[in-house]
Amino acid sequence: MSLLPVESISALSRLHPKPAQIHFQYGTAGFRTIASVLDSVLFRVGVLAGLRSKKLDGKTIGVMVTASHNPEQDNGVKLVDPRGEMLDTSWEIHATALSNAQTTDDFIRELEKLVQALKIDLSKPARVVYARDTRPSGASLVSSLEDGIKAIGAEGRNAGATRETPQPLTIDCANGVGAPIAARLVEYLGDTCLWFWKTPLNNACGADYVKTTQKLPPSLAGRLQPGQRGCSLDGDADRLMYYYLDDRSHFHMLDGDKITALVAAFIVELVKTSGLDSQIKVGVVQTAYANGASTKYLSERLPVRCVSTGVKHLHHAAEHYNIGVYFEANGHGTVLFSQPTQDILASYEPTTPAQSTALEHLRNLNQLINQTVGDALSDMLLVEVVLAHKAYSGNEWDSLYVDLPNRLVKVVVVDRTQFKTEDAERQLVSPVGLQQKINELVRRYDGGRSFVRPSGTEDVVRVYAEASIKTQADELAFRVAGLVYDESGGNPATRPKEFL
């Protein structure tokens, strides 16, 4: 468990001393008073926002510096939770306590009490996005806020700053059938919006390479810049995998689960805003390979169904919803609008400007999306539309939820047909007794989940495992693989060493 960065917080806190004889209170409008006394409050709010983000597994917390309708000499600050709602009321007490700590030492003690009471894992990432209104005091108060964000080690982004021209999207088409179409898209969208890169066909490139190796295609090394996102199609352009480099040039993959979360949440938002949520039901279809964190995120927002692996299963299940969203983790998928839903969108009469705008967006999405599965370029344009509408960077998209560590292992067997499954391939029914052994193993790991399924194309059995820690996910996968190897008639003397 990481420790509170006391030295960093103390050094910066001393630059923002609390004025004596003033009591601050976090209320419905956050903190709001005359701007000249708010310097220490903004610093401490920056620290608190970072802790709130860590408590929520790295989800982005918003901070707005404003006093709304108050006179110009006033200012204020309020925190915003990840879904745009007001700060959880239970945290208002903590905000008030931190703001009233008289000295830096008192402030550190309050922080330590808060971290201990709420069991905040300080090793978690923290992300804060902030902005201000046009008051003259705003610039200096934002500077104080930024010191607080820096002190707690959070990643901050000033949404109110003048934005630079966004870096072009990098497309790796694996030099397959999507390459000539992508080249034509460049002509329409311009080099500042889209950048196309050619590589040898499926040679250390493409969606499958990115998904299986979880790293940047070598041909893009040195070309993709920090903060820039890219995407890879596979050779026949039916799979799509996104990724980006963070400020430290670390690679982050945005797979089919991330695409599902981004797109489904956006469509749900549009349906609700349009006033059609009583007529149009949005649903998501996944397979057992979907990351458990994505399933949890989506299940809190809309119906989610799990089906057997294979696009044919996902597509048919998606047809049962008014709008069905599905992407396999490998990036293969689309969005389906039923015919009755298209009829509703065509005939519905909105009653407010907000409804009219949302309705127009839904109609345009219906035209943009290729509902015949297997068009990664159409899917790419869909993702870009949503990111533009939400003003999301790759990092903000990634922070919708934090993937559980996972590992996929394949075990070579003599006869894969002896392995039979049920419950959308999540439970083994044959060989008898093997599922019980797997269940016993899974119970030993925090956040553990594992399933086994025979490949449909080769004599291997695929083992998938998740756990709260990467080393445990790896260990669980290999232990289950060992069970599969032994059950398949493999010789224990020749069992692969990694199968523990």
Image: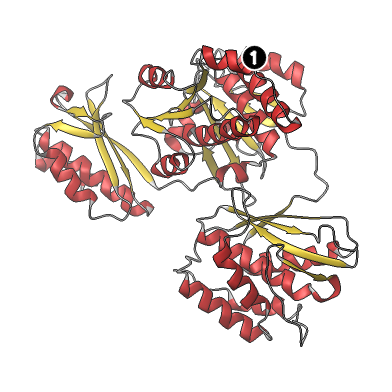
User: What residue is at 41 percent from the left and 33 percent from the top?
Assistant: 304
Q: Find residue 90 and report its horizontal and vertical position in percent.
A: 54, 66
Instruction: Look at the image and tell me whether residue 490 can be seen.
Output: no
**In terms of depth relative to the viewer, which is nearer, 221 or 102?**
102
Question: Would you call the spot at circle 1 few (<14 residues within 10 Å), some (14-19), or many (20 or more)?
Answer: few
Kindly identify the amino acid type of the residue bearing the numbered disc 1. Answer: Ala
Answer yes or no: is residue 447 visible: yes
Name the side, left or right, on which 211 lies relative to 362: left
In the rendered image, which quarter contains the N terminus? bottom left
For residue 96, what is the image quadrant?
A: bottom right
> What residue do we see at 28% from left, 50% from top?
475
Residue 357's x, y, as percent? Answer: 72, 28
Q: Is residue 408 above or below residue 308?
A: below
Q: Is residue 246 left or right of residue 305?
A: right
Please name the residue shown 21% across and 34% down the image.
427
Q: Quadrant of residue 9?
A: bottom right
Q: Nearer the viewer, residue 418 or 371?
A: 371
Q: Which residue is mark 1?
A: 346
Q: How is the image coloured?
A: secondary structure
Counting from the top left corner in percent of width and height, residue 381 is at 64, 24
| Residue placed most toward the observer, 371 or 397 | 371
Q: Secondary structure at mark 1?
A: helix
Q: Is residue 430 above or below residue 72?
A: above
Residue 434 image offset from top left, x and y in percent: 13, 39
